[in-house]
Image: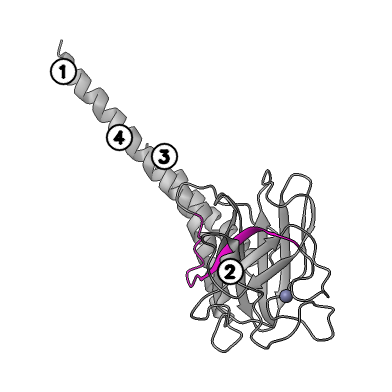
């Protein structure tokens, strides 16, 4: 017999299988990851607004969630998700603010005060307020997860003094306690427990570092619903491609 030929042909088969597997994996990544995000971003851009994202981290730099900022005709829709199991922000209500500087190093104090270009006082219920960066509380579930959506017309992603993408940037911060929406300068919301620098994202690409699992998206209607519809149609189209690939093997 010719063992060397057999070995070679076995290796050939294995290599071919690996190639097919790799192709399938790449196909799935495109189907479920890249395309829905791209479609969502495209729709957001078509609506006339920009997008930004913030990778949310705890004080030790561990990723705990993600926030997206989508500019539309009525202002900026902010979606924030915290992943189950995170314990930087415990169950219950926590103050959320856009802070004036896009910096979280050496610690979250580097982000400065609440974004406040008009010199107002703090709090959505303060007669002399609010700061442009003041937002409603986020409510964290028992398992650490949270899904938050709010709309604000006090900031923009485009130009002007209310732009949160100004030259020194800005940071989304979640505080240890709830915000009384009245007490200047920070609503007695306590220490800064989660933060993420807000970065422009014209492509809608996730800022999640490679190798980290993307967080489940929920709650958004501006981008996520069209993205989901896009994903469904892509799955139908892509399913055909996958089936053809399977038949070829
Ligand atoms: Zn404030």
| Picture layout, residue 167 above or below residue 232 | below
Q: Residue furthest top?
A: 1
Q: Which residue is mark 2?
A: 111
The residue that appears at 49% across and 63% down in the rendered structure is 205
- Compare residues 46 and 241 and report the one nearer the observer: 46
- Asked if ligand 1 lies within 8 A of label 2, the reply is no
Q: Position of residue 36 (x, y in %)?
A: 54, 60
- Compare residues 152 and 177 and report the one nearer the observer: 177
**Which element carries disc 2, helix, strand or loop?**
helix
Crowding near the residue tagged with mark 4, few <14, some 14–19, many ≥20 C-alpha atoms within 10 Å? few
The residue that appears at 29% across and 29% down in the rendered structure is 13
In which quadrant of this rendering is ligand 1 seen?
Answer: bottom right
Discs 1, 3 touching: Cβ within 8 Å: no
Q: Which residue is mark 1?
A: 4
Q: Position of residue 28 (x, y in %)?
A: 48, 48
**152 left or right of 16 in image:** right
The residue that appears at 58% across and 62% down in the rendered structure is 196
Q: CA distance from mark 1 to mark 3?
A: 30 Å
Q: CA distance from mark 2 to mark 1?
A: 65 Å
The residue that appears at 16% across and 20% down in the rendered structure is 5
What mark, if any, has residue 247 been given in the picture? 3
What mark, if any, has residue 16 been given in the picture? 4
Q: Nearer the viewer, mark 4 or mark 2?
A: 2
Q: In the rendered structure, which disc, 4 or 3, sits on the residue that comes first in sequence?
A: 4
**188 left or right of 51 in image:** right
């Amino acid at each position: 017999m010719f063992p060397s030929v057999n070995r070679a042909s076995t290796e050939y088969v294995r290599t071919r299988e690996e190639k097919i597997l790799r192709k399938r994996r790449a196909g799935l990544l495109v189907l479920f990851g890249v395309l829905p995000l791209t479609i969502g971003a495209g729709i957001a851009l078509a609506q006339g607004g920009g997008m930004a994202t913030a990778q949310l981290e705890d004080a030790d730099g561990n990723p705990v969630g993600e926030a997206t900022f989508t500019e539309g005709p009525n202002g900026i829709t902010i979606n924030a998700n915290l992943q189950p199991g995170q314990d930087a922000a415990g169950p219950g209500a926590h103050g959320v603010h856009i802070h004036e500087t896009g910096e979280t190093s050496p610690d979250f104090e580097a982000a400065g005060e609440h974004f406040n270009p008009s010199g107002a006082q703090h709090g959505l219920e303060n007669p002399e307020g609010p700061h442009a960066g003041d937002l409603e509380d986020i409510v964290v579930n028992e398992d650490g997860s949270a899904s938050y959506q709010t709309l604000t017309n006090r900031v923009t992603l485009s130009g002007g003094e209310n732009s949160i993408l100004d030259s020194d940037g800005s940071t989304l911060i979640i505080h240890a306690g709830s915000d009384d929406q009245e007490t200047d300068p920070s609503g007695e919301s306590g220490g800064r427990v989660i933060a993420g620098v807000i970065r422009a994202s014209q492509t809608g690409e996730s800022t999640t570092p490679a190798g980290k699992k993307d967080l489940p998206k929920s709650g958004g209607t501006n981008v996520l619903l069209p993205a989901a519809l896009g994903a469904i149609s892509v799955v139908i189209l892509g399913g055909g491609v996958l089936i053809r690939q399977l038949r070829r093997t």
